[in-house]
Image (cartoon, rainbow, N blue to C red):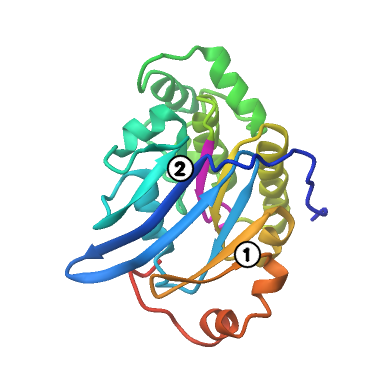
Amino acid sequence: MAAPARAARVSDAPLFACEDIKLDLGGRSILHGISLDVRPGEVLGIIGPNGAGKTSLFEVLSGRMRPKSGRVTFKGEDITRLPLHARARLGVGRTYQTPVVPDELTVGQTFKAARQAYRPYLTRLDAEYGAELVHLHVDHDDATAQLETMNRRKLLLACLLMRRPAILLMDEPAAGLINSEVDEIDHLIRMLSKEMNVAIVIVEHRIELLETIADRVMVMDAGSVIASGSLADILTDPKVHAAYFEGPGEGDGA
């Protein structure tokens, strides 16, 4: 992969943040006071062993789960109580580790459903814009069920990008991809952040991807943040080495 680009200037003011997030599930404490912030044009990477609580944090940040305490802010406004669909309207997009597409629809029908998911309704030109951004080159009459993993990821991402989100929460976008496809994801994320000024928070296990795209990295273990900073610095931290490379974490299995 190419060296990371740093052309765009990252704003000083956080676009999206959370503060002291705590989450309980099934009587168990899953997140223990998590705080983070990300600015326009910045890529914040999150790593940690299985069970660290990374996906549970995304559930809170995206609005699928309500935290026990703490708050989530977007453009300085408290959105902690807003559900997922309301955050999407504001410009908070999310991708998932498994690219689940509506198997009963064609590519074109999927784009139409996304265009008409909520007001303002979008046009076919908007769908073409999203598809071009991610270099999705498939026939709109193709069944989504027949798409390979990379094109499924591209389709779902195109549906998000045609709404011009301000921030993307990306859960392991390189999962299931071969090296050449990971390079595509690399270039796409850097284009979105550095050229389009989209803020990105990415959970990813592939260190070589984070090495090229992440401005900062946060490490989670057992529901807590144990380190943050540059990737080079945190990988030499004894706490990170013990948690990430030597022993399993505890938590929600993500």
Quadrant (top left, top right, bottom left, bottom right) of the N terminus: bottom right
Q: Residue 129, percent across and down?
A: 61, 21
Q: What span is colored magenta in the figure? A: 167-176
Q: Residue 149, percent across and down?
A: 54, 48
What amino acid type is highlighted by mark number 2?
A: Arg
Q: Is residue 114 visible?
A: yes
Q: Is residue 88 above or below residue 180?
A: above
Q: Residue 68, percent across and down?
A: 24, 58
Q: Earlier in the sequence, mark 2 or mark 1?
A: 2
Residue 46 among magenta residues: no
Q: Which one is in front, 131 or 21? A: 21
Quarter of the view holding residue 219: bottom right
Q: Is residue 147 visible?
A: no
- Residue drawn at point x = 46 percent, y = 31 percent: 91
What element does badge 2 sit on? Answer: strand
- Residue drawn at point x = 54 percent, y = 23 percent: 140
What amino acid type is highlighted by mark number 1?
A: Arg
Q: Which one is in front, 113 or 17? A: 17
Q: Is residue 72 above or below residue 104?
A: below
Disc number for residue 206 = 1
Mark 2 neighbour class, 10 Å CA radius: few under 14, some 14 to 19, many 20 or more: many
Q: Are marks 2 and 1 in contact (CB under 8 Å)?
A: no
Disc number for residue 94 = 2
- Residue drawn at point x = 66 percent, y = 37 percent: 192
Q: State the CA–CA distance, disc 2 to disc 1.
A: 19 Å
